[in-house]
Image (cartoon, rainbow, N blue to C red):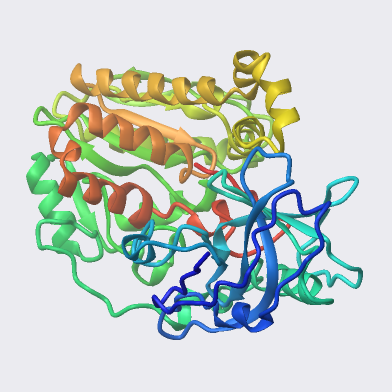
């Protein structure tokens, strides 16, 4: 059997295919054939550790046969280079421009487990001193890769595992591969709004025909909020000093901010909840054209002041409506899942969709639907869709809708994005969708690095929002 190298260089035909490797001794007459297996590297990418004579098992198998090759850790990815023969087309066919079929980006690695009589999870930052017989790599996209080092030279499995534990879980942004070896910046087409300067916000205001809202640099040098852009769209009746004062009482310094407007003046607004030491919920009535507090718990002055600030901001939102209609406030925390609940649900879904072996597969398959329901993933999706429908119907009926959530940058992004896709056909186009992601997720500060776990921190909450 002939084996191809990634660069179409032929290897010798002396390597032996291993089926049922527990019963057959490892034997090859040409040990140097593995040294010719190399992964395709990007500019600046370099190999850190390598293990030869590694077996990669197929998903949901009995782990008795697999592909043989070399497993390589670089400063960007984990790459398995097989000795199997490739066609010329397969050699250059990748899932994307950066990764091959058996490659996984280090930032996509979620957990590492040792194979053995009992699976054991490895902790990031810890060095392995014992022999590593096999390794299970669980990825954030539900991909599971299982490797055996039974036939690898002594120490190869341990060295590769230690390299993976160190480089797949960086504790600082500067250690990420993309920081030092990023590609040159290419500007997007002019019709895609990146929301990096006032002109792009102004074009979106003009496109939607928004009235009663103004563009402000109140967050210049991020003095109001570190998670918001410097240019914001706020109610016209709200002054910059008023915004700065009110922002102190909102979590993350995120008062009501404009997202979208309908042709008839209804607006979609996002804001965070007030500081957590305020436990009550306001009740607003309109009296003489002004909103007042009808009920709150005035136990102390510190309890009432932030609530007053919140209602003052909602009053400016009301004044931005052409008919001065009271806004509809949707408290997402009451119904939609929190990031922690999303993560718990995702882990259950991943365990269901990526069984370790055939036995576990058949056990789960016998009651798959009940396990799927128990993960609550479909329930969480349906709740988000229902809230998006509720918000879009409110906008369609010419009411301003205010989305309020704890920190204002997780499920607010989901519901706001879905609502705009439902009600504005522009966001259902390719260019419009890219602009929507830039606005609701990038510009308005969704914490991608924290939620996706690009930087390892045991105290942060990961969640595939």
Badge count = 0
Residue placed most toward the observer, 408 or 125 = 125
Find residue 128 and report its image quarter. bottom right
> Does residue 398 show up?
no
Q: Residue at x 64, y 59 (%)?
A: 17
> Does residue 265 show up?
yes
Where's residue 423, x and y in %?
20, 27
Position of 441 relative to 92 (above/below): above
Residue placed most toward the observer, 288 or 153 = 153
Position of 415 relative to 206 (above/below): above
Q: Residue at x 32, y 32 (%)?
A: 418
Does residue 59 appear to the left or right of 262 in the view shown?
Answer: right
Does residue 394 appear to the left or right of 137 in the view shown?
Answer: left
Does residue 424 appear to the left or right of 307 in the view shown?
Answer: left
Where's residue 67, x and y in %?
61, 57
Position of 92 relative to 270 (above/below): below
Find residue 87 and report its image quarter. bottom left
Residue placed most toward the observer, 436 or 298 = 436
Does residue 217 appear to the left or right of 461 in the view shown?
Answer: left
Q: Residue at x 39, y 32 (%)?
A: 403
Residue placed most toward the observer, 3 or 60 = 3
Where's residue 86, x and y in %?
42, 62
Where's residue 93, x and y in %?
34, 60
């Amino acid at each position: 059997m002939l084996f191809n190298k990634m660069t179409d260089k032929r290897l010798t035909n002396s390597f032996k295919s291993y089926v049922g490797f527990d019963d057959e001794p490892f034997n090859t007459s040409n040990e140097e054939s593995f040294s010719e297996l190399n992964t395709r590297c990007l500019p600046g990418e370099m190999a850190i550790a390598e293990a030869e004579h590694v077996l990669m098992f197929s998903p949901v198998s009995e782990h008795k046969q697999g592909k043989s090759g070399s497993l390589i850790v670089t400063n960007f990815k984990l790459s398995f280079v097989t000795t199997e023969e490739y066609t010329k087309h397969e050699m250059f066919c990748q899932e994307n421009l950066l990764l091959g079929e058996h490659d996984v980006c280090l930032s996509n690695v979620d957990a590492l487990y040792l194979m053995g009589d009992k699976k054991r999870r490895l902790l990031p930052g810890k060095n392995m001193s014992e022999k590593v017989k096999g390794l299970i790599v669980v990825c954030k996209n539900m991909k599971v890769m299982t490797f055996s080092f039974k036939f690898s030279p002594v120490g190869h499995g341990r060295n590769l595992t230690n390299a993976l534990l160190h480089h797949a879980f960086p504790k600082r942004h500067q250690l990420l591969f993309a920081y030092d070896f990023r590609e040159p910046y290419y500007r997007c087409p002019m019709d895609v709004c990146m929301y990096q300067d006032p002109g792009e916000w102004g074009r979106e205001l003009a496109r939607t025909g928004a009235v009663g809202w103004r563009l402000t640099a109140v967050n210049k040098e991020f003095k109001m909020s570190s998670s918001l852009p410097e240019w914001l769209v706020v109610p016209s009746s709200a002054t910059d000093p008023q915004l700065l004062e009110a922002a102190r009482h909102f979590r993350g310094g995120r008062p009501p901010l404009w997202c979208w407007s309908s042709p008839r003046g209804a607006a979609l607004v996002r804001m965070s909840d007030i500081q957590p030491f305020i436990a009550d919920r306001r009740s607003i009535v309109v009296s003489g054209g002004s909103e007042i507090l009808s009920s709150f718990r005035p136990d102390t002055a510190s309890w009432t002041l932030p609530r007053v600030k919140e209602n003052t901001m909602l009053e400016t939102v009301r004044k931005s409506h052409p008919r001065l209609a009271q806004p509809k406030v949707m408290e997402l925390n009451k119904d939609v899942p929190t990031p922690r609940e999303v993560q718990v649900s995702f882990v259950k879904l991943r365990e269901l969709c990526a069984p370790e072996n055939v036995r576990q597969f058949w056990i789960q398959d016998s009651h798959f639907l009940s396990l799927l329901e128990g993960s609550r993933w479909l329930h969480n999706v349906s709740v988000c869709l229902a809230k998006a429908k509720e918000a879009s119907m409110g906008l369609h009926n010419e009411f301003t809708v205010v989305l309020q959530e704890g920190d204002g940058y997780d499920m607010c992004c989901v519901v706001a994005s879905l609502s705009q896709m439902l009600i504005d056909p522009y966001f259902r186009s390719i260019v419009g969708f890219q602009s929507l992601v830039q606005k609701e997720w990038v510009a308005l500060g969704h914490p991608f690095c924290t939620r996706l776990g690009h930087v390892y921190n045991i105290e942060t909450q990961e969640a595939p929002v």
